[in-house]
Image (spheres, rainbow, N blue to C red):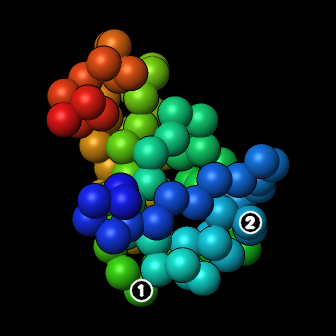
Amino acid sequence: MAAVDGVNICLRKFDDSTIYREIKRHGVTHVWSAVVLNMLASSSDTEPLKNQIQILTTGAPPSASVLFRTESLGFTVSHGYGLTKTAGLVVS
């Protein structure tokens, strides 16, 4: 991230409102998380994001309803599975 003048945002504790607040505050363009996709889709106090955000989720594939809801909020979801710590997108 430093090579492309990017910023990493790391949260020690989080909930859906914190995540959405930080996305808007920092102009986030990409998110990687294996655990928050359902939380983002289930949030009741948010409106669709103004800018499209790429989100990479890993582990078990999300359900169709979670994907549709997440995409309706302004996320473009990609799913990675298996050895994500050593995949080319991480080490290249």
Give percent across and percent down for residue 45. 72, 74
Can you say whether 26 is above or below 43 in the image? below
Q: Residue furthest top?
A: 83
Tell me the quarter of the picture where residue 46 sits.
bottom right
Could you tell whether 92 is left or right of 3 in the image? left
Can you say whether 57 is above or below 51 in the image? above
Q: Amino acid at mark 2?
A: Thr
> 57 or 67: nearer the eye?
57
Say which quadrant the C terminus sits in: top left
> 9 or 23: nearer the eye?
9
Give percent across and percent down for residue 32. 44, 45
Residue 42 visible in the displayed image: no
Could you tell whether 12 is left or right of 32 in the image? right
Q: Nearer the viewer, mark 1 or mark 2?
A: 2
* Tag 1 residue: 50
Q: Secondary structure at mark 1?
A: loop
Q: Secondary structure at mark 2?
A: helix
* Tag 2 residue: 18
Q: Residue furthest right?
A: 13
Sequence-earlier tag: 1 or 2: 2
Q: Amino acid at mark 1?
A: Lys
Can you say whether 66 is above or below 71 in the image? above
Residue 10 visible in the displayed image: yes
For the point 74% across and 66% down, the residue is 18
Q: Residues within 10 Å of mark 2 (few under 14, many from 20)?
A: few
For the point 65% across and 63% down, the residue is 19
Give percent across and percent down for residue 56. 36, 43
Tell me the quarter of the picture where residue 91 sits.
top left
Give percent across and percent down for residue 83. 34, 13
Can you say whether 63 is above or below 22 in the image? above
